[in-house]
Image (cartoon, rainbow, N blue to C red):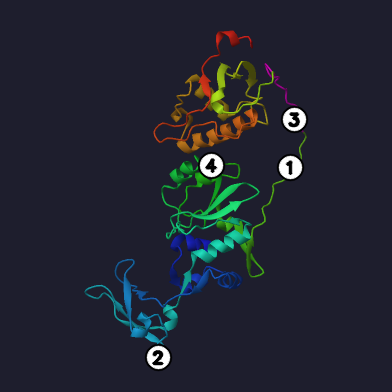
Amino acid sequence: MRGFFDLLARNGTRSLPLALYTGAVSAEEDIALRAAGIVKRGPLARTFECGAGDAGCLREVRGFDDDVARGDERPRADGTYVAVCSQTPHVCDAIDVPVEGLAQVTIHRAPLARAVVEALAITPARQTHHKAPPARDDEPLLLGDLPHEARDVYLLLHPRADLELRLVARARDPRRALFLVPTALGVDPALFALHGHDAEVQLARLDDRLLVRGESIVATPQLRAVPKRTRPKTIPRILPTDARPLPPLERWNLLRMSLVDGETILLTIGDKSSRRTYVDMGLAAKSNRAPLKAWRVLVAILESEGDFVWHPFGTYLAVAQEITALRRCLKSALGLDDDPFEPLVEGVGWRPRFVAKSAPPRDKLRGR
């Protein structure tokens, strides 16, 4: 269905020439789309390409009778209309246009949303009488949630230039989300990498998620890459400096994290403290146990005591990706699912919810 979704990304849910549509979809896809009510016969076009003058110049189609204005759009008896140049003075001659040349189809959003919900096994969202669905393609439409992931799913047919800010803003919500766009058209490729399958807010393409099989719209099988079997390398184990257990962490602001050195931090909850290396925190490369870039970001956060300056680490998208990896590792290491970072504020950057210190207290230097 890549041709259809490309057409959808470029034109949105509106009427478009029948010839343009049939050139983008297969016969099987056309049957499936019409059966689902996504594509229906549209009104006859009121304009016709001029073929002369400036790009986008159109001829005005004349010959419609009063019945058309009332919605009864029956073709004329002779099956032809007249297309007149809309420029003044005219730059092209008037021509006769057969009814087939004015035929259109209309793409409907509501049936498309229902087809996506059914194919991807989404639990439909309840629509309340006081909150109507958005009427524009550039506004996200809540489809429902993925029950096995506890994730809200949104349909966004025409992403705007502020998509990145929209995704960052949605990350402040404690509930995870998935945004579905037709194709990669008009979307920064880095956003798909940043908001992949492990992200709190995911971004995915409909042309990767749906296909037509047996004249029905179904989900694309998600293949799992099987790693190539290789002889395991002998990796020297870095033993933790201090493996003392810590009490359960109830809130991030009850944790004090202090920097001991470039490879070690000290975690303190209440009167209990324990040292952890970057390996213990899950921030080591699997191949050679070298510290990941996300560890260096954590060190910078502690060195600045929470006043983190991200510009030295690269672009905003690159740093946001490292923050996402760091957020995931901190949640896993401390056993707390809440976000360890404050909601992102434009112009301020990322601020930790835990207490960040550039050095441990004197009475904790020896792990007491």
Which residue is the site of mark 4?
A: 194
> Circle 3: is it few (<14), some (14-19), or many (20+) Cα within 10 Å?
few
| Type of the residue with mark 4 | Leu
> Circle 4: is it few (<14), some (14-19), or many (20+) Cα within 10 Å?
many
Q: How many marks?
A: 4
Q: Is residue 161 or residue 6 the one in the foreground? A: 161
Which region is colored magenta? 232-243
Is 235 colored magenta in this rendering? yes
Is 358 above or below relative to 92?
above
Q: CA distance from mark 4 to mark 2?
A: 58 Å
From the viewer's perspective, tell me whether residue 9 is left or right of residue 63.
right
Residue at 56% in and 63% down: 114
| Percent position of residue 276, x then y | 64, 20
Q: Can the viewer see residue 15 in this picture?
A: yes
Q: CA distance from mark 2 to mark 3?
A: 80 Å
Q: CA distance from mark 4 to mark 3?
A: 30 Å
> Circle 2: is it few (<14), some (14-19), or many (20+) Cα within 10 Å?
few
Which residue is the site of mark 2?
A: 78
Specify which label sits upstream in the sequence, 2 or 3: 2
| Type of the residue with mark 1 | Lys
Specify which label sits upstream in the sequence, 2 or 1: 2
Q: Is residue 191 or residue 69 the one in the foreground? A: 69
Which residue is the site of mark 1?
A: 228
Which residue is the site of mark 3?
A: 233
Specify which label sits upstream in the sequence, 4 or 1: 4
Tell me the quarter of the picture where residue 36 sits. bottom right
Residue at 54% in and 64% down: 112
> Circle 1: is it few (<14), some (14-19), or many (20+) Cα within 10 Å?
few
Residue at 33% in and 84% down: 66
| Percent position of residue 261, x then y | 58, 16
Q: CA distance from mark 4 to mark 1?
A: 25 Å
